[in-house]
Each structure stands twice: as C-alpha cells, then as structure tokens.
Amino acid sequence: MTMPQAPLAATEPQPGRALRLTFTGRGGEYFRIWIVNLALTILTLGIYSAWAKVRRLQYFYRHTSLAGSSFEYHANPIAILKGRLIAVALLVGYNFTGYLELPLGLALLGVLLLVLPWMIQRSLAFQLHNSSWRGLRFRFAGTLRGAYLAWMPALVIGMAFAGTGLVFAWLGRQGPDVAMDTIDNFGPRTVGATILLLIALLVLALPFAHRQIKNYQHASSRLGAAAFRFRAGVRSFYWVYAKGFGLLFWIVVLAIAPLIIPIQEVDSLDPEIRRAAIEQMLSLVMPIVFYAGPVFIVLPYFAARLRNLVWNGTSIEDHTFVSSLRAFGLGWLYLTNFVLMLLTVGLFKPFADIRLARYRLTHTELLARGSLDDFVAIQEREVGAAGTEVAGAFDFDISF
Amino acid sequence: MRRAPRWQARLTSTYRSEAVTFAADYFDGHTTRAHRVTLSIDAGDLVMVGKGIARRESLSALRVSEPMGVAPRLITFRDGTHCQVAADALPPVFAKTLVVRMQESWRAAAASVVVAALAVVAAYVWGLPAFAAWIANRVPASIQAEIGDGTLQFLDARVFSPSALPATRQDELREAFRGMARSGNDRPQPYRVLFRDGGRIGANALALPDGTILMTDQLVGLAKTDEEILAVLAHELGHLERRHSLRMLIQGSIVAFAIGWYFGDLGGLVAAMPALMLQLRYSRGLEREADEFAATMMRANGVAPSRLADMLAKLDAAARRDRQEGAPDYLATHPATEERIRSLREM
C-alpha cells in the first residue's frame, strides 16, 4: 500500500491578504513540449497546431496558481482547428485577389477590418469559456455591439494611418512633379500643418482607444456569477502615453545630440566628404534611434506601465489586483531574450516565453478581502457546458 | 451538440491491482470551495471519500490529465466536476500516451530539433522561392507594371543626368537589342531601353519593375564591343522576364512576416534586421538566373556568353577603383562577381 502524500494546499486567505500568483513552469520542461509540438506540426502540415496550442496553454495554465489552486484550459482542439482553417482560407483568398486586382484586394481588406471586432469578441469568449479556476468556468459577457463600440476608435485610427500612408505612397509614385503641384496648390504651410494636425489627432486618440478596448475586455469578463470590474480612467491612460512618448522623444534627442557638434565642424569641409561623413554618422544613429531605443526601452516602458494600469484597475467582488511590473526589468528581459534567441537560432524561444510568463505572473497579486471560496457558478443545466458551444475560434492570442 | 471528450483513464500494464491511496482537492463546480478528499483505486474503480462526500466511479468514466512537470494532475468526472492532485502525490499507475512519452524524452526532443531545422532550411532554400515564383508568374504583366515605383523619377532628379550618347547611337543599340530579343526569348515582355549619364553611380545597368531598362553612358564607354553591351541588356531583360522584383517583394514580405511572428513578443520592429540579412541571400540566386537567361538568349543569336563575363570583369575592376571603404562584404548586394564570371565562361 502506497503512503498517502501531503494533501494539496488549497489555502483559505485571511481578510485583506496579498496573494501572489505563482508560476512553476520550467524552461527545460517546456522546451521538450514546444519542440515536439513544432515537429509534429510540421510533419502534419499544420493540422497538429491546434493540439499544440491546447498543450501549450495547458502547460502555462496548470503551472499558474492562485491561492494554491491552478488554472485549467479546456478547449477542444477540433474547434481551434476549424477556426484556423477558416483563417488560412481567408488569408489565401485575400493575398490572391490583392495581387490580381488591386481594388478587390482593398475591398476585401476593408471587409476584414469591419468584421474584426466580431472576430475579437468570439475569440475572447472562446478563450474565457475554456478557462477555469477551482472548477468554475470564466465567461465573457461582452456583446457584439459593445465590441464595435470599444474597437471603433482603434479601427478609425488604424484606417486613418493606413489611409495617410497610402496617400503618401501614391503621391510618391506619381513623381516629384505631382507632389510639388499638390503642395503648391495648397501652400506648403497648409499641407505641413494638416499633416502635423492629423498625426497629433491620431496620437491623442490612441490612449482613449486603448482604454475603450481594455474596459470592454475586462468589464465583460466573469468568473461564474461574479463580474470583473474595470476602474482605470481615461486620464491615467493619457498620462502613461504622455510619459512614454516623452521617453521616446528624449531617446531620439540624446541619440542625435552628440552628432550636432561634429556636423558643425564638418560644415566647412568639401561637400562630397561632408555628405559621406553625415551618411556614416547616420548609419550609426539610425539603428539606435529607430531600433534599439524603441524596442528595448520605450516598448517595455509602455508594456509594463499599461499592463500595471490595466490590472491595478481590475477587481472582482471585493478583491483587487495589484500589478507591479517594472519597465527596466521587462526591457532587460526583452533584450536578453532577443540576444539569446539570435545566438541559438531561435531555439531559445520556449525559454524566453517561460521567462516572460514568470515575470508577468510573479509580479501580479490578488488583494483578497474575504474568502475566495464563495464564487458560485451561474445556473446551468450541466456544469462545464457553457464554453464548448462557442465553436470555431478565430484564435487571436489575446495576451494578458 | 457537444461531443463527449475521450475518456483516458487507462491503467499501466504493470498495475497489478495493488491498492493505492492519495489525497486530493475536490471541486464540485458550483462554488470555488475546495473539499479535501482521499482517493483510492479499487478493482477498476476510483473511490472518493471526504467530509460528507462518498463516491465511486468506474475508471472508464474518468479522465486523467497528462503529466506536465510539477503541474497538478486533474481527475475529471463525466459530470464535469474534478479533483486536483499534486503532481508528486499521484501514484504512477496511469498509462501515458505516445505524445506524452515523446515530450518526456530528450531523444525525441533532439529528433524534433532535427525535423524542425530541416523543415525550416528546406522551406527557405527551396519552398519559398518556388512559391514566390509560382505566384509571380501568375501576376499579369499589367499589374507588374503597376509596381513600378518612382525610382526612375528619383534617379533622374538626384543622380542621373541626360545621356551624352548621340541619339543615333542609342537607336542603333536599341535596334540591335530588339533583333536579339526576338529569338531566344520564351515569353516576350514589354520593355524599353533608356540611356543616362550615370553620375556618381558610374557604369551600371538596372531593370525597373515597369519594364524600363536603364543603362549608363559610363557602361557603354567601358565596353569594347557592342556584343558586350547587348549581353548586359540581355541580363537585365532576364530580371524582367523572370519577374525578379516581384519575387523579391513576395519572398521578402513573407520572410519579414515569419520572423516578426516568431519574435512576436518583442515587437514587429525586431523583425527588420534579421529579415534584411536573409533577403540579401536571395539576390545572388536571382543574379545567376538572369545570367542563365542572358546566356540562352545570346547563344540563340550566335553570341558567346563569355562576352557577359568580359563585361562583368571590366565592371568589377571599375567598381574596385571607386569603391568606398566601410561596407562589410557580407552585406553587399553584389553577389560574388568572380563566381558569376566563372560560371558564364563555362556556359
């Protein structure tokens, strides 16, 4: 007879206690799952990818626990496979028409953008309905109308940017003459001012659009009968974005500043040499300004601060979340992950995923006020029936 | 209609009906309250005993989650309720599926690395170019003309000056090339030949996607015979015929997309650098293809393909004289010219 092991610790929290999310995933373990997933996906020409996704999410879910109990992922791989086949068909169709007839391709892109909120709502519902904690399924109560309202600002911004880009590209192709004529017609100052105004308007609308999306996502989520609430206001989003763009501005300035002085000196030299010198300096600056700076400093800043903002403003019943990601911690992770992935020709990716997940999860806490035992399921004929009716996920990986 | 999940609680073949007992947390699916229970396996059944709980289910009506590191194991009943068992608390009496055994074996992992690496290399070297060529060949010539960007206008404004070659000389060359292109050309593509003073670019020729072939006066000056000039024109026409710019566009965007997706967590910007380096490798293969096209066309017209090799040698020598220091070789877009010269002499 085998000896009984210690019982699983399903702890009861004291009132007002901070419960850290724990993550027990390990890189070496996950690497084997990941690489076998990859090989089987290749050998089955992608069919296995649905099972691979389920395994991957189960690994991360089951190694994440709150108050001693882990999460669980229930999705049926067949449903995911159906969704993926539809997505592939759409992608192929779009690419074909895009090359053969430009207007048709653009129209199809427009249609795809219009159904995007619907696809996102379905994805969120699928993801949440197939997730559970302590036997209770999560739910997504967001309506289709809510999805469109929440995503419309972001879509408008996206289409405006794309539209402006297309106009510039078209102008560029017409040749410098047409561009000059256009500018002459409206006056260079007007054109410049319009462009600046457009950019400023779009940038100013970004924080608002982001907040709408997160509000929809979090405020529509449920655990059983309990609803999540979202309290972060629009002003806090603007504040984070302002600081982020300020950081970007200073990086650009600091990268270019050391070059201002040498350029003054170079002014007196022969024009050919001056041009070559400037090109040399630019080739040093460009990678820093447009690549390393934004990716390893500004991006993690936005990621960490926005994620903190979103989760600090999320609560369920009397319990609130506390997110304490640090911008530099995250940036360091991004940098080391990137370097190691390059050095290992990409094989480091599963380790990188684990590191990121561990960082995010261990910097998230639930401030529990009261017992966590009292969440109840909604009235259902059969426990666990809810999620599987939402078949055919367009499985966008909506990461938390 | 919900499809019933496959129930997987199979005992290992080495299980010999010894009694096993272990602790678990039971969740009834109505609240998040955990109920401490003791589970035991007895004669093909699972017995669950706890405070106010007594339940007996046949193992064939249960599902046991696969082992996954230190994650808790889940034993799920048909009604959706389940027990969570600590990974080290569950006795190893349940059989493992093939995939699980693969995931736990380092040998299977090594084999998987090999499979993945071979697949990626095969896709990059062979699959992607074939795919891009297939798509590019299906694009009508009218669409390819659309892809013509403002390159000509840009070059005319910034780099080139009007050609110093007399118009008669230009027309002479155009006529000669038109005659050559009539034979030895499988699928005639609309094109036009323009001459320019190359400015600081010097001796060069390029083919623009919309069918324009540009040649600089300096290149004409370098050539000793007309055959050498026609050889270069044939090479440029090869780029057009084979839709190289379109293929590069397709391949480049797929590579950039794949890398951006793979490095996903770190942002699409990260994709730019590695993607660029991979794209450069493609241009060498395309140059070779253009060389082969030119060689075929020249042979069909009774011109020795080595003329192109002679011209390349002259161009290389001229470029060496003007080359600026600083550009690392492996980033150069000009493929190993010596290799090309050698192949052309052998053709």
Image (cartoon, coloured by chain):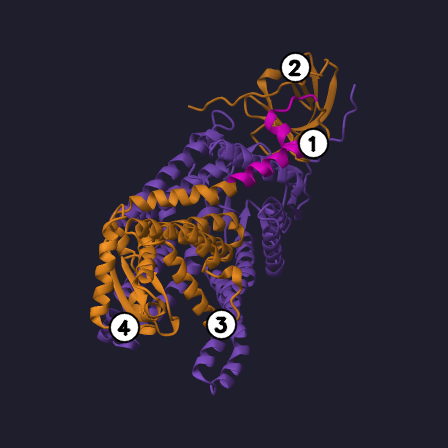
Chain colours: A purple, B orange
**In the image, are marks 3 and 2 on the same chain?**
yes
Residue at x-position 23% and y-position 59%: B176
Q: What chain is tagged by disc 3?
A: B
What type is the residue that disc 2 sits on? Asp
What type is the residue that disc 3 sits on? Gln
Residue density around tag 1, few if under 14, some if 14–19, many if 20 or more, within 10 Å: some
Give the structural element (helix, strand or loop) at label 4.
loop
Query: Which range of residues does the magenta coloring cover?
Result: B93-119
Label 3 with label 2: CB-CB less than 8 Å: no
Marker disc for residue A332: none
What type is the residue that disc 1 sits on? Ala
Counting from the top left corner in percent of width and height, residue B249 is at: 38, 53
Q: Upstream in the sequence, badge 4 or badge 2? A: 2
Give the structural element (helix, strand or loop) at label 3.
loop
Q: Upstream in the sequence, badge 4 or badge 1? A: 1
Residue density around tag 2, few if under 14, some if 14–19, many if 20 or more, within 10 Å: some
Looking at the picture, tell me which residue is in the foreground, B98 or A302: B98
Whole-number angstrom distance, CA of label 4 to CA of label 1: 80 Å
Marker disc for residue B163: 4
